[in-house]
Amino acid sequence: MNCYANLNNLMIYRNLLEDPIIQDLRRPKEIFSAELFGRLIDKAEDHGLMGIIPVEYVLHAISHQENVFSLVAEKNSGKVGEGLKKAAAKDIVLLRAFLEDVFNRFKNHNLLGNYKPTVIRMFTGRSILEKCFMDFRYDPSGKEAVKLMCEYYGKYGYGIMADHVAFNWDGEIQALAGIRNYATMTFEDIYGYDTQKEELMRNTEAFLHDKPANNVLLFGDRGTGKSSSIKAVGNEYYADGLRMVQVSREYFVQLPKLMQALSKWGKKFIIVLDDLSFEEFEVEYKVLKSILDGGLEVKPPNVLFYATSNRRNIIKEVWQDQDQSELHNVDSVNEKVSMADRFGIKLYYDSINQAEYFTMLKGIARSESLNIAQEDLEAEAIKWEMSHTGRNGRMARQLIDYLHGK
């Protein structure tokens, strides 16, 4: 059919022609092979695709395509020039015709026409892609579809940026590695600490709207929800273009390379430094301190740092800091405090009392439909508290899990 040959006229999405699966889908139906079907099943299981798999695979390939259109739209929050819009519109019309043919050929296929993978994964922004490429009577010129795709790239990005809420910095290969099973934590899942959560959200929203924002240090007692709050930030603002990047201490020295890599994207990034703490004899904090504020290399405007620590000043402080054994002992104190000073906002997460602990447990039990009487829950909570290490969100979570299993 002409739609196969017309794909040779692609300009923006031309790299799709190099995809072996798409090459096979351009061939006549009569010569489709079991090898093609096997590769499509592999992709469906790998990406968690469901439905008409050949169609879903092509949409997935389009969403991951790195080309001048996706690059410019992502970098400029969906804004592209008129010339690029016209070229993209022509490509969308060609791809729409091809996908219509693929849809008609596979919609009644006994295996690939309604495939259900073992694990279904979220296909970010699929409804936008479906509107642009699968509504065959919509927008014959492709102009409206281009507008939607500009919004798609501005909002979700392409490739790994569309796939993941969060990333690890892999220092071995010095590249971002997507976190496939990111926590589903939301602010509603964190009981209490309303003031802290509101301030964290306010600062994050200012950052996303290109207003002045601060690096944030969340400190306080263990298990109180510091790390959970940062995870909730990632889920809350993913659709607004925010991505989280976690860096382990051993790769702090590579932070300049990471920031250089992030500066190439239009997305906003929060670099997460979890459980940050240094002994007084450790010097790695000086590298981090220089990067956060005061070094020659300026932090890109699309990067912020959020850190958690059990110590308010991050670096271990001892009574000897207060004696007069050092000629200028105030300098020693200033050196240690200066690390925490790099964080303009400091949020304290303190321990909760028993009444607050009971309220937290009741809220979790109710939200998870745990069938237990209030007095029994409180009795179990007291026993659990006595055999563990106090009252906090982590202990509450462990107790609820125990009661579910019991």
Image: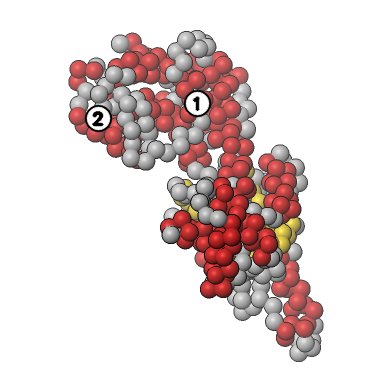
- Quadrant the C terminus occupies: bottom left
Apparent side of residue 74 relative to residue 203 in the rendered image (left or right): left
Residue drawn at x 69%, y 55% as measured from the top left? 193
* Colour basis: secondary structure
Please provide percent x and percent y for residue 197. 69, 51
Please identify the quarter of the rendering in which residue 94 is found: top left
Residue drawn at x 46%, y 20% as measured from the top left? 133
Please provide percent x and percent y for residue 206. 73, 43
Residue drawn at x 52%, y 48% as measured from the top left? 368
Q: Tell which of 220 and 131 is nearer to you.
A: 220
Apparent side of residue 323 relative to residue 278 in the rendered image (left or right): right
Secondary structure of the residue carrying tag 2 is helix
Name the kind of residue labelled 2 in the image: Phe
Name the kind of residue labelled 1 in the image: Ser
Secondary structure of the residue carrying tag 1 is helix
Please provide percent x and percent y for residue 232. 60, 49
Residue 101 vs 287, above or below: the answer is above
Residue 90 vs 259, above or below: the answer is above
- Name the front one of labels 2 and 1: 1
Mark 2 and mark 1 in contact? Answer it, CB < 8 Å: no
Tell me which label, 2 or 1, sits earlier in the chain. Answer: 2
Q: Tell which of 107 and 300 is nearer to you.
A: 107
Please provide percent x and percent y for residue 162. 50, 37
Q: Which residue is mark 1?
A: 127
Mark on residue 245?
none
Residue drawn at x 73%, y 51% as measured from the top left? 199
Q: CA distance from mark 2 to mark 1?
A: 25 Å
Q: Residues within 10 Å of mark 1 (few under 14, many from 20)?
A: few
Q: Which residue is mark 2?
A: 37
